[in-house]
Amino acid sequence: MINKIIKTIRFASTREIDYVVIRALKGERKRALDLMDATGLNLATIYCSLHRLEKREIVASEFDNNSANENRFSARTKYYYLKF
């Protein structure tokens, strides 16, 4: 039984995951949670992919300064976008 389950699991390569994230970012800047909703990928997988893409200078990120003005303890929102 377990052998059947293992054979049916498809492991995506990092290139495939990065491609899906790039396609989801096309045209506008998005938060990681928006990318999770758009792609259906796990949030940890999205953050790993974004980190790889930032190292390769394909994706850049910026913080939204307006979101932290209400409360000094609130987290700022980080947006990701394509550099080209």
Image: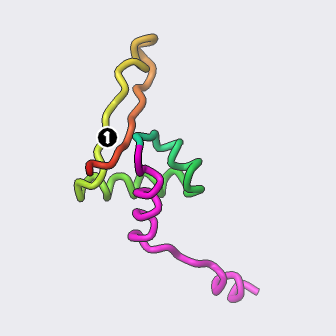
Residue topped by disc 1: 61
Q: Is residue 9 above or below residue 44?
A: below
Residue 71, image x, y percentages: 45, 12
Residue most toward the right? 1
Image quarter hosting the N terminus: bottom right
Residue 68 falls in which quadrant of the image? top left
The kind of secondary structure the magenta stretch mainly shows is helix
Residue 78, image x, y percentages: 39, 35
Residue at image coords 35%, 21%:
65
Label 1 sits on a secondary structure element that is strand
Left or right, 62 with respect to 29, comes to left
Question: Start and end of the magenta stretch?
Answer: 1-27
Residue at image coords 43%, 20%:
67
Residue at image coords 27%, 55%:
58
Residue at image coords 68%, 88%:
3
Residue most toward the front? 27
47 and 35: which one is in front? 35
The kind of residue on which mark 1 rests is Ser
Q: Residues within 10 Å of mark 1 (few under 14, many from 20)?
A: some
- All told, the count of numbered labels is 1
Q: Is residue 54 above or below residue 66?
A: below
Residue 11, image x, y percentages: 53, 76
